[in-house]
Image (spheres, rainbow, N blue to C red):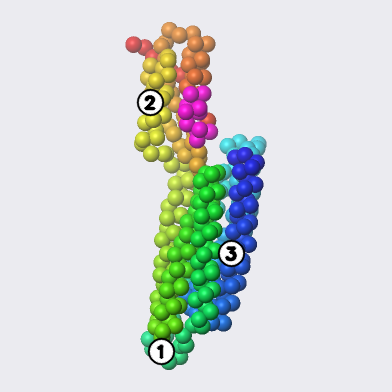
Amino acid sequence: MTKESRIEILKAVKIGLAFNVGLAILKLTFGIWGNAQALISDGLNSFSDVFISIMLLVILTIATKKPDHDHPYGHEKFEGLAYFVLGVIFFITSIFIGIFAVESIVAYIKHPDNFDSPHVLTVIVSIIALLIKFVLYRYYLIISRKHKSPTLKADSKNHLLDAWATLFSVIGLTLAQFGLIIFDFIASIIIGLFILRLAVQILLESVAYLVDQAPSDEEVTRIHEVILSIEGVVTVDDLKVRNHMTQKYVDVEIGVKSTLTLSSAHKIAENVHHKVESEFPEVIHCMVHVNPHRQ
């Protein structure tokens, strides 16, 4: 990762942190003051986002460092670890919000007279939060695609999910203005379900990043075809490709004519090495082993 990419990614996380702090304070303050369960749940979600942003700043600072003696393959997998922890935090947050909302619905059904409609200002606050979250989603999505950052990609999904969650908060709080208070609590449950869905998706993807899962069969086939097309390569005896976060490592055994000199066989191996890395920019390194092939 270039220095420019590192700076821009960290800048994006800092901007997200600043907005998450502001949104958490805004939602929780007006949610508690305005008696809005959905806004409080949304505020708790934003509060968890604050911790996530702080964690991302620390992890990404490490993950974007250059390879060193102790980490010759780089520090990118620290980002995969952050991705996994992010999923765990989302999962816990969703369960907490869901339990809180269900308890509120049960209490409302038993004693509806004990509940007042949320203040109309809570609707306005939710609309403002919705607009801010959508802008953050678009910003993070652009930066994550530009620099191929899985963690920013996950956080962009989080911002989009927050936007959907806040939309349901707006709907629930608006209906509550007309005496349909239970929809405030239903909106909280929907918010929790949105977060739970994202948590499961992130956890599954992060595990794939951390265990060096192979790319798709189509990608491996394309690499195989390129290697076989190189002059001097008679066979591809073995080919292994593994993901390293958003990049890849390739290990290949090629068969060349057994009558070739060591120098000629080495030259073919070099051609394979350079061809694969030039044709597939996401490949960090292509390791080539030469086998003698007898007709």
Indicate which disc, 2 or 1, sits on the residue closer to the N terminus: 1
Label 3, residues with CA under 10 Å away: few <14, some 14-19, many ≥20: many
Looking at marks 3 and 1 on the same chain, the residue that comes earlier in the sequence is marked by 3
User: Do tag 2 and tag 1 residues touch (Cβ < 8 Å)?
Assistant: no
**Residue at position x 39%, y 30% from top?**
222
Question: Which residue: 65% across, 41% down?
Answer: 3
Pick the residue in front: 237 or 102: 102
Check disc 3 and give the amino acid type: Asn
Q: Residues within 10 Å of mark 2 (few under 14, many from 20)?
A: few
Q: Is residue 69 above or below residue 253?
A: below
- Which residue sits at x=57%, y=48%? 78
* Residue 145 shown in magenta: no
On residue 225, the disc is 2
Q: In the visual, does 295 lie left or right of 76? A: left
Q: Residues within 10 Å of mark 1 (few under 14, many from 20)?
A: few
Query: Bounds of the magenta span?
Result: 274-284
Tell me if residue 147 can be seen. Answer: yes
Q: Position of residue 69 (x, y in %)?
A: 65, 36
At a point 58% along the width and 37% down the height, the residue shown is 73
Q: Which residue is mark 3?
A: 20
Percent coordinates x, y for residue 283 in the rendering = 50, 33
Residue 203 at what x, y percent from top left?
45, 54
Real-space CA distance between mark 2 and mark 1, rounded to the nearest whole angstrom: 69 Å
